[in-house]
Image (spheres, grey):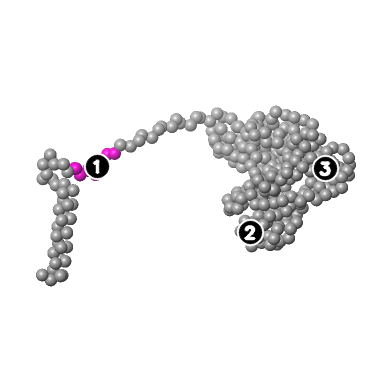
Amino acid sequence: MSLGHTVRVRRSVAVLSLLALLAACGGNDDHDSSSSAAPEASPSATHRTITPIQLPPPPPPSGKLIADIMQASHDGARNQFEIWIDNDTDKTITPRKLTYRDDRFRAPIVGTRLREMPSQSQRGFAFAIPDQPACDRTAPHGTLTVDYTVSGQQKSVTLPVNDDNDVIQRVTSASCLELSIDKIAHLSWADEVTASGDGGKGSTGTMTLVVDTTGRPGSTLVIDSIVGNPVLSPGEHGVFTANLTITGDQPPQRVPVPLKPTRCDAHAFGESGSFNAFAFNVHLDGQPGQFVLRLGEAGSVNAIDFAKASCGFLTSIGGGQG
């Protein structure tokens, strides 16, 4: 027998064996009912499924407008807060004027970005924070007067405004603290940001705090520490311990503050709206407080360029230890 004939015979035997095995596994209509072979599944057989939970229907509109104060990081950068209005009525309303009144401010504040509000929707409206709050007054909350149009009719309603995060108290306290500090010294960041070595990957930076004293004796300011943000950190672990005592009759000074990237990932650089904001923990005449000091436009560009270069996203920003 030739080699080719032998190979063909072996292939034929293998094929016959495979067919016999498939026949045994697949079953046969002629098999006795006592056969151990499993019956074929019917294509029309049903399968048990989980019955979805029926959620209760949403409640009907209460017929009210509800107002809450919020402040995201981009609002802080723009020196504003937002009042979110929930239109819990069954009709679309169109705000014509929004007026926020609060004894902690010297005058009413008018909202911006007015737009239509469909039934049971929420919209946020921006309110600029005044430069001169009423530092000698307090209030538990403010009110919002909404002048609006609905179904062709003009209406007006005044609402209490919820402020669960104490946004107004925080911003007015910080502004009043800054006004008191300005009587001692004007604080600002210099535009320049220097870097070690060639300013490339792994470099450390230096910002400069400019202390321009007023020349008048009186109160004492102690800067305890400066805290960074998700992009830029002064000192190790995001905090620079300053321990800096300032009085108005001291000469002006420039204080170097170390700088490093907080994180080196694209998400941190893309998502932080307050990369140029640094919180100052201070004591003014022994009383603790906190305020935020932001880099100027040029300083912000220089600081973010330094951080990108230090992370290796840019080649360098120019070296030179500051």
Q: Which residue is mark 3?
A: 246
Q: Up-down: is 241 above or below 8? A: above
Distance (Cα) linking label 1 and label 3: 85 Å
Task: State the residue in front, 298 or 278.
Answer: 278
| Quadrant in the picture for the N terminus | bottom left
Is 306 magenta? The answer is no
Main SS, magenta residues: loop
Give how far across and how far down residue 303 sits, in percent: 69, 54
Q: Which residue is mark 1?
A: 44
Disc 1 marks a residue whose amino acid type is Ser
Q: Dot 2 corresponds to which residue?
A: 201
In the rendered structure, which disc, 3 or 2, sits on the residue that comes first in sequence?
2
Q: Which residues are magenta?
A: 38-47
Q: How many marks?
A: 3
Relative to 262, 252 lies left or right? right
Q: Which of the 4 image quarters holds residue 94?
A: top right
